[in-house]
Image (tube, grey):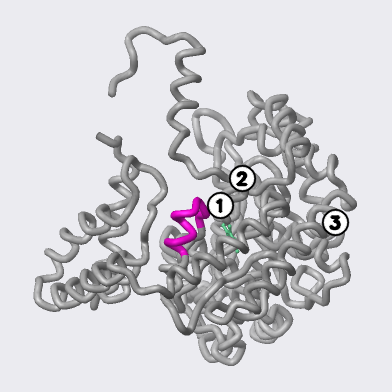
Amino acid sequence: MQLPSKGKSKNAVLSQMTAWRKNDVRWREGKVFSLVFFAGEEASSVVKEAFNLFFSENGLNPTAFPSLRRFETEVVAMMASLLGGNEQTAGNMTSGGTESIILTCLAAREWGRAQRPAVNTPEIILPTTAHPAFDKAAHYFDMRVIHVPVGDDFRADVAATEAAITSNTVLIVGSAPAYPHGVIDPIQELAALAKKNDLLCHVDACVGGLMLPFVRRLGYDLPNFDLSVPGVTSISADLHKYGYAAKGASVILYRNASLRRHQLFATIEWPGGIYASPTLAGTRPGGPIAAAWAIMNYLGEEGYVQITKRVMATVQRIRETIDAIDDIKILGEPAMSILAIASDSLDIYEVGDELGLMGWHLDRQQHPASLHLTLHGAHVDRSDEFLRDLRTAVVRAKKPSLGKTVRQFLINFARVLVNWLPSRWVSRLFPQAAAKFSGEGGGVPKRSAAMYGMMANLPNRGDIKEVVLDLVEEFTTRQK
Ligand SMILES: *Cc1c(COP(=O)(O)O)cnc(C)c1O
């Protein structure tokens, strides 16, 4: 495609775009359990109007738009007060959880260099359940990640973390909660360990930062997980998840300004003038900053507590029903509204596929195999429908069928094949096989049990990584 030589009418452009949405997941109907967070039409309209009001503004130069600067400092202050901070707390808004985490890793590296110049490759100790954004940061900043396994309860293993500390360690990480199973790591123990060893400790509350404080206010018993815990040096919380803000909004908070200092950048030699920037982005869109301020002021504590109450009631209903179904179970002890469903007796991916055929889109997880639920405002009125379909899906997944037999045959066939073929060939064959099992027409894949089954059987995980990168390239290239 080329840039059209002549422009089209506004109507033509917008109606084409609307038409191309037809294969997108239907999040408004509560059929999706990730990617979109929704607190109702009215809250949504506040966010949109605030976003549009500051649609053109740029937060790059804080002196040009004192309004944006005020929004940002007030959002940071509100988050600090929610997350155990005090007057010392310093932070910034970022474009999302990944940027918040990348910045905290950068700050840890720079802090490490300042403290211990002998350290060449600073190390981050990470529970296996921690978000890949930490691995991404390490990849970008030439740091090393030491993954430590989690316990049977899916929480970070404190003893294993202690054993992983070396003279190169700069940062220990815990999640509140971790995304895969929704459980909170033992933050107090991890932070104490960091303090004892003179290390930094980051709490990833990207998904929990605007949920856990309100869950607690509803009377649920939760451990302390934030800056109020001695030894926690930074915390990240996403406004664009349970803050119900517009996408492109997260917060990174440090215990004090001298820790935050390690994240900042300035150069004074550029012919274009002195250039300073607190976060990764240069140009910083005003919309997400303004929208975050707007929704926090619109909902207030009371509004967030009300939404949280309805979401948690939905969580209870779903958990009770799943507990009552023999073949499936919830993994670990989820602290809020993020759950993983697994099974000891049947292929849980088959259950996911059956639900997929009924229009529900649940993410697949591995080690162990499970389906992921993130429950929010869009699911409150959908739980009966979902639970009815979940029961049906379990019954169908248990029934033997020709399709299942064929798929199992293909999985076994692939297993034999990959043992014989050179790994280069396997990598090449795999995307084609994967495409066969995924959706036609660029929509959501309808069946993935077979693909996951095959992936689990590939002898060389390195192959899978190449295949995944191939797919990323393909997805970011124009479809034919
Ligand atoms: C979503 C999430 C992140 C990453 O945030 P993005 O906004 O997707 O970049 C990090 N950690 C946890 C626990 C998350 O749930």
For badge 2, the amino acid type reads Glu
Dot 1 falls on a residue whose secondary structure is loop
Mark 1 vs mark 2: give the one in front: 2
Q: Are marks 1 and 3 in contact (CB under 8 Å)?
A: no
For badge 3, the amino acid type reads Val
Q: For mark 2, does the 10 Å Cα neighbourhood hold few (<14), some (14 to 19), or many (20 or more) residues?
A: few
Question: In which quarter of the view is residue 45 placed?
Answer: top right
Q: Closer to the N terminus: mark 3 or mark 2? A: 2
**Spatial distance from mark 1 to mark 2, Cα to Cα?**
8 Å
Q: For mark 1, does the 10 Å Cα neighbourhood hold few (<14), some (14 to 19), or many (20 or more) residues?
A: many
Residue named by callout 2? 29
Question: In which quarter of the view is residue 27 placed?
Answer: top right
Task: Kindly identify which numbered label has been placed on residue 305.
Answer: 3
Quadrant in which the N terminus is drawn: top left
What range of the chain is rendered magenta? 352-361
**Residue 204, can we see it?**
yes
**Spatial distance from mark 3 to mark 2, Cα to Cα?**
23 Å
Residue 430 x, y percent position in the rendering = 21, 61
Task: Kindly identify which numbered label has been placed on residue 32.
Answer: 1
Task: Kindly identify which numbered label has been placed on residue 395.
Answer: none
Q: Residue at x 74, y 42 (%)?
A: 40
Residue 13 x, y percent position in the rendering = 46, 17
Residue 262 x, y percent position in the rendering = 62, 58
Q: Indicate yes or no whether the magenta region holds residue 378.
A: no
Q: Are marks 3 and 2 in contact (CB under 8 Å)?
A: no
Q: Closer to the N terminus: mark 1 or mark 3? A: 1
For badge 1, the amino acid type reads Val
Q: Indicate yes or no whether the magenta region holds residue 354.
A: yes
Dot 3 falls on a residue whose secondary structure is helix
Residue 80 vs 423, above or below: the answer is above
Magenta span: chief secondary structure:
helix
